[in-house]
Image (tube, helix red, strand yellow):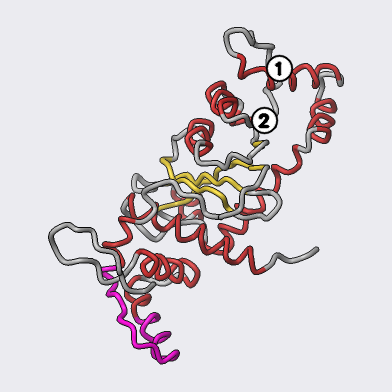
C-alpha cells in the first residue's frame, strides 16, 4: 500500500505514506544512484507516465522517514535455507577517492563502515544484513545475526575470522553445525568446560589426520564442502558492482535504511535470474 492505513493511536497527525512506499523510494534511489531531489522528480515522472493519481513524498520527507527503516535486524527472505554463509566487507561513507589517497595520503574525514551479510548459497539471496563500525569484529556481529536465522538452518560457513569461541557457543545453542577452518596453530580445547568447541576439535583432528600441512587443509575444505563460502564473495562483488563502493547517507540511521533498501533491491534482482556460465 502506498498510503498509510494504520493508526498508531498517539497524538499528532498520522503518516501519509506507508513504510513500504518509503522503502520503494529508497530502492529506486539505490538502483539508479539518485540524489534525494532527483528521486522526487523521478517518482513524479513515473506516476505521470503510468497515469497514477498518487501523491509523491518530498525529498525531505523521504530523508526523515528513512531514519525509521532498517533499525531492527529483519530477515530479507521468506525462504528457510539450511545453509548460511557469513562474510563482511568495507564501504566508504565519505572521503577522498583511492587515487587522491595514493597520491597525497588520506585525510581525517575518511570514514568507513562495515557491511555484514548472511547469504543463502543455494539461491544467492541475502538472508540478513547488518551495518556496523569498521572496528566491529566479524564473529561478534555474526553471533547477534545468527539469533535471527531460521530453525531449519543446519550449517553455517565462515572464514578464519569467525573462529571464535562465542560464535561457536551461539551456534551450539541453536543446533547449527559450524564449518569454519581453524587457525594453523589451533589446539584441542577442553570440551568439558566448553562443549561448543567439539566441532572445532573435530576439524583440528581431521586436518591433523590428513597430514597437518597446507595440502591437508585444502583437502579438509573439499571434504567439508567449504567451497560454498566463496559464493558470499560473489554476492559482495554483485553488491558493490550494482550499488557502488560507498554510501550516499551520512547519518547512522539513514545508512542502516540504505543498506536495508540495497539488500531488498539485490534480492529482487537475484530472483529475476543469474547469468549462467
Numbered disc 2: secondary structure: strand
- From this view, report whether residue 19 is shown above or below residue 111: below
Residue projecting furthest to the left? 11
The residue drawn where x is 71% and y is 21% is 184
Q: Position of residue 188 (x, y in %)?
A: 69, 11
x and y, in percent, of residue 234 in the image: 67, 53
Quarter of the image containing the N terminus? bottom left
Say whether residue 155 is left or right of residue 98. right
The quarter in which the C terminus is drawn is bottom right
Q: Cα distance, mark 1 to mark 2? A: 13 Å
Name the residue at 46% across, 49% down.
74
Q: Which residue is mark 2?
A: 177
Relative to residue 64, is residue 124 drawn left or right?
Answer: right
Q: Nearer the viewer, mark 1 or mark 2?
A: 2
User: Closer to the camera, 264 or 211?
Assistant: 264
Please tell me whether residue 10 is drawn above or below residue 15 in the rendered image: above
Q: Point out the stretch of residues depicted in magenta.
A: 41-61
Instruction: Assess whether residue 179 is covered by the magenta stretch.
Output: no
Q: Which percent across, then down, holds residue 267?
A: 57, 61
Quarter of the figure with residue 241: bottom right
In the rendered image, is residue 94 in sight? Answer: no
For the point 38% across and 80% down, the residue is 43
Q: Which mark, residue 240? A: none
| Percent coordinates x, y for residue 124 in the rendering | 66, 54
| Residue drawn at the location 62% of the way across and 7% of the way down | 192
Q: Earlier in the sequence, mark 1 or mark 2?
A: 2
For residue 212, side relative to residue 164 (left or right): right
Kindly identify which residue carries mark 1. Answer: 201
Residue 29 figure quarter: bottom left
Amino acid at each position: 500500500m502506498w498510503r498509510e492505513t494504520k493508526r498508531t493511536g498517539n497524538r499528532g497527525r498520522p503518516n501519509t505514506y506507508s513504510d513500504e512506499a518509503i522503502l520503494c523510494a529508497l530502492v529506486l534511489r539505490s538502483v539508479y544512484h539518485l540524489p534525494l531531489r532527483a528521486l522526487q522528480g523521478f517518482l513524479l515522472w513515473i506516476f505521470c507516465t503510468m497515469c497514477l493519481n498518487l501523491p509523491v513524498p518530498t525529498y525531505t520527507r523521504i530523508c526523515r522517514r528513512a531514519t525509521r527503516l532498517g533499525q531492527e535486524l529483519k530477515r530479507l527472505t521468506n525462504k528457510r535455507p539450511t545453509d548460511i554463509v557469513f562474510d563482511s566487507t568495507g564501504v566508504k561513507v565519505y572521503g577522498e577517492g583511492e587515487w587522491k589517497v595514493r597520491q597525497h595520503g588520506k585525510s581525517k574525514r575518511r570514514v568507513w563502515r562495515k557491511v555484514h551479510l548472511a547469504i543463502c548459497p543455494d539461491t544467492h539471496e541475502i538472508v540478513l544484513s547488518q551495518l556496523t563500525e569498521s572496528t566491529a569484529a566479524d564473529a561478534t556481529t555474526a553471533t547477534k545475526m545468527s539469533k535471527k536465522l531460521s530453525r531449519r538452518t543446519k550449517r553455517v560457513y565462515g572464514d578464519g575470522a569467525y573462529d571464535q569461541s562465542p560464535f561457536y557457543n551461539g551456534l551450539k545453542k541453536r543446533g547449527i553445525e559450524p564449518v569454519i577452518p581453524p587457525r594453523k596453530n589451533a589446539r584441542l580445547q577442553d570440551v568439558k568446560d566448553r562443549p561448543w568447541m567439539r566441532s572445532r576439535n573435530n576439524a583440528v583432528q581431521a586436518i591433523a589426520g590428513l597430514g597437518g600441512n597446507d595440502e591437508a587443509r585444502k583437502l579438509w575444505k573439499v571434504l567439508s564442502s567449504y567451497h560454498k563460502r566463496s559464493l558470499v564473495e560473489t554476492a559482495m562483488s554483485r553488491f558493490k558492482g550494482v550499488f557502488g563502493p560507498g554510501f550516499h547517507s551520512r547519518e547512522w540511521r539513514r545508512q542502516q535504511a540504505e543498506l536495508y533498501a540495497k539488500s531488498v533491491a539485490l534480492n529482487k534482482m537475484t530472483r529475476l535470474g543469474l547469468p549462467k556460465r
